Amino acid sequence: MQVLTQDARSMMDAYAQQLAQSYGVQSTQQLFNVSPAQETKLRQAIIESAEFLKMISVSTVDQLQGQVVDLGMSALHTGRKKGGRFAKNVNVGGHKYALVETDSCAALTWEMLCQWANQGTKNQFMKLVSDYSNQMFALDKIRVGWNGIEAAETTDPDANPLGEDVNVGWNEFVRQRKAGQIITDPVVFDADGGGDYKTLDAMASDLINNNINPVFRNDPRLTVFVGSGLVSAAQYHMYDNADKPSEHIAAQQLSKDIAGRKAYTPPFFPEYGMVVTMPKNLQILTQRGTSQRKARHEEDRKQFENSYWRMEGYAVGVLEAYAAFDNASVGTGATAAEEPTDTGA
């Protein structure tokens, strides 16, 4: 049975006191509002905790519901106007976002706290606690973004371990507003030539040429997000048939460049999915002034709980600059043509 040591308890109390001081409150035992300045600082700390969040748009909005703003995704910004100055305004997409109550809790068990207390100084301990909490909050944002289907009144993490019921993520956001951007017809990736696509280049090119608006097709920011299952299937074939060093190098570069575009496999991205868009087209929106925190010992559960509550939602700025093969519709290997693989949302 794990017992919270005196050193761990002392360091944990010091962390709670420091947290209260930084937020300007008497205690973190009860839920407290975060000031605008600290809200910005918290958001930045969470962004810094996950590389993928630095690539996309993570911002605040004033209203619970509103029109999605085109954050720098619009087309031509250069021209002239007779008798005046040419200007390109930031566009409003015409489709709406909706924010919902979002409650995160990074629980640190007594066992974890005791191990961290033995690893160094009080300052090192507090940094471990802070970094861990921010990273858990950050990864959950990404997890829900790629896999979210609905915002259930009461969520079930056992039945929906990827946050499918926490919020409507990017893929579902687009599906509900412009379904043609999401390919749901069964397709097969088979590097041996027995399916619809033999290479990831062909698969991505099909998405780009048929589903991405021509205005954005040659945008250098266009990125292919691809699932690890598809990358593994393609790399296996390339390694298996490679007889030259250059072919091995090509296999290693596969996950970095697809169809002449940058390629990336984000955390928690659907294993057999593929999305083509500009990273900044993916948005996470939080209502300004709604962030609340709480951090305290929960002895009955033998853990210290660091909580973060806010109104939050997901959006895609320009629907025509987003195209995807739905994860559940993609099979791999020749046999998949007859029995499509059901890989989830």
Image (cartoon, rainbow, N blue to C red):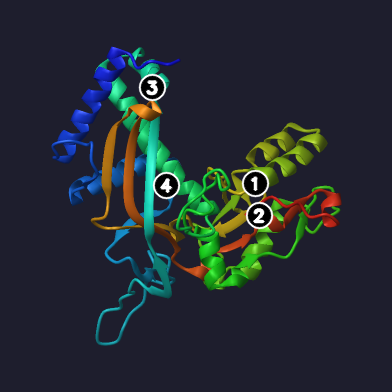
Which callout, 3 or 2, points at the residue further toward the start of the chain?
Answer: 3
Q: Locate the C terminus by quadrant.
A: bottom right
| Helix, strand or loop at mark 3 | helix
Residue 297, compared with residue 51, is above or below; it is above
Q: Residues within 10 Å of mark 3 (few under 14, many from 20)?
A: many
| Measured Cα–Cα span from mark 1 to mark 2 | 7 Å
Is the residue under label 2 in contact with that under label 4 (CB below 8 Å)?
A: no
| Measured Cα–Cα span from mark 3 to mark 2 | 38 Å
| Helix, strand or loop at mark 2 | helix
Give the foreground label among 4 and 3. 3
Tell me if I can see residue 208 in this picture: yes
| Helix, strand or loop at mark 1 | loop
Q: Residues within 10 Å of mark 4 (few under 14, many from 20)?
A: many
Callout 1 amino acid: Glu
Residue 125, compared with residue 99, is above or below; it is above
* Residue that label 1 marks: 271
| Residue extending furthest toward the bottom | 83
Is the residue under label 1 in contact with that under label 3 (CB below 8 Å)?
A: no
Tell me if I can see residue 52 in this picture: no
* Residue that label 2 marks: 327
* Residue that label 4 marks: 53
| Measured Cα–Cα span from mark 1 to mark 4 | 19 Å
Which callout, 4 or 2, points at the residue further toward the start of the chain?
Answer: 4
* Residue that label 3 marks: 110
Which callout, 3 or 1, points at the residue further toward the start of the chain?
Answer: 3
| Helix, strand or loop at mark 4 | helix
